[in-house]
Amino acid sequence: MTIPKLVLSSPADILAAVPYLVGFHPADSLVVTGVAGPEVRLTTRWDLPVAAGDLDRLVALLRRESVTAAFVVGYGAGALVTPAVDTATRLLHAGGIRVAESLRAEGGRYWFYSCGSASCCPAEGTPYDTQRSQVAAEAVLHGLVALPDRGSLRRSVQRCGGAAMRQVTARVAAELRAMPEPGAPLADELAARFVTEGLARVRSAIGLYDSGGRLDDEGAARLGLDLAVVRVRDEAWALIDDRDAHVALWRDLTRRIEPGHVAPAASLLAAAAWHRGECALAGMALERALAADPGYSMALLLRQALTHMMSPAMLRDRMPTPEELDDEMGPPRAIWLAPLRALLARDLPGPASVSALRRP
């Protein structure tokens, strides 16, 4: 994500910026924002209380991103926040990273950890209002979003599809069941056409969401099923960049397509969110992916990366381009459609059910 220039000249400015950097207004949280000069490199958050050892990888993460200074903000009661802030501060100092500011915020007031004087840090705290902040206005102007709380962020990836989407999906599934098995006449040729059309649908959908559009139910159902084919999914993965379109598209599909085959779309949402530094959203997307398919390899890989606080660049730099994917995988073959066939056989209604759904 390209973070707009937000001038943080006071503690109130920092507190106004944090919700837009993590995607929601934190509560009972520790937030560390790393900067290099005037540039925000990353923001990461932990629930409080922080489990023993959870902060041990913090310095390594910041160093990988060439961070030179950090803001440390704890949200909640002092007894909950202070031990975590003290631990983070100690680790940062030991790692040679300057703590530019450390704060505790609760109930619309903040306290400094770096000041022991009543003149700069009164016992009752200093009031602040993120809603009236120029920083918040600039963040909104540049398209950043801060949902009310973590629950709101979780709801933003929950399913919202209904009967109409199920009917469309069942009809598309019935068409795809007619695809010939490997070894049948024209099986490879038809598989090649399916993959080519799937790749085109991926690129078209990204362009559509980039222009502010949205797939209709049939387009969403077809693309959701296309992603069961690894070559199509990997095309979408390789194309992820800083544009908002990727998060918008894969979040929309994660919410709309049938639960039994949401794993690829939810994993792509996780990859797009992680690419933008939205680790909370990435984690929630992975929960949806693994609830649908506990063994889904892309989701497991991304979960491992998040757990070990890897930089998105470490995996992104290893991602092949679409052209390299073509070279590595060769021409499409009917066997590529095996995951799609397994999905259709396992999770979606058969032809008799489709007929029932289509009767007036």
Image: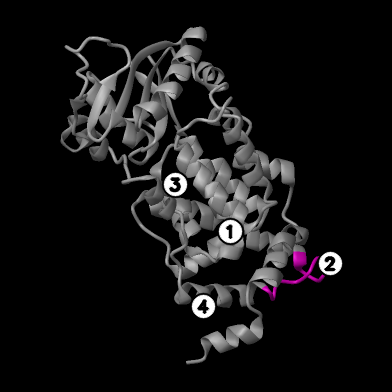
Q: Which amino acid does label 3 sit on?
A: Val
Judged from the image, the secondary structure of the residue bearing numbered disc 2 is loop
Nearest the eye: 80 or 131: 80
**Chain-order first, disc 2 or disc 4:** 4
Mark 1 is surrounded, within 10 Å at the Cα level, by few (under 14), some (14 to 19) or many (20 or more) other residues, namely: many
Q: Which is in the foreground here, disc 2 or disc 3?
A: 3
- Tell me how far mark 4 sits from mark 1, CA to CA: 21 Å
> Percent x, y for residue 50?
50, 30
Q: Which is in the foreground here, disc 3 or disc 1?
A: 3
Q: Which amino acid does label 4 sit on?
A: Gln
Q: Which is in the foreground here, disc 4 or disc 1?
A: 4
Relative to 9, residue 47 above or below? below
Identify the disc placed on residue 183: 2
Residue range corresponding to the magenta coloring = 177-187
Residue at the spot of label 1: 198
Q: Which amino acid does label 2 sit on?
A: Gly
Q: Main secondary structure of the magenta part?
A: loop
Residue at the spot of label 3: 247
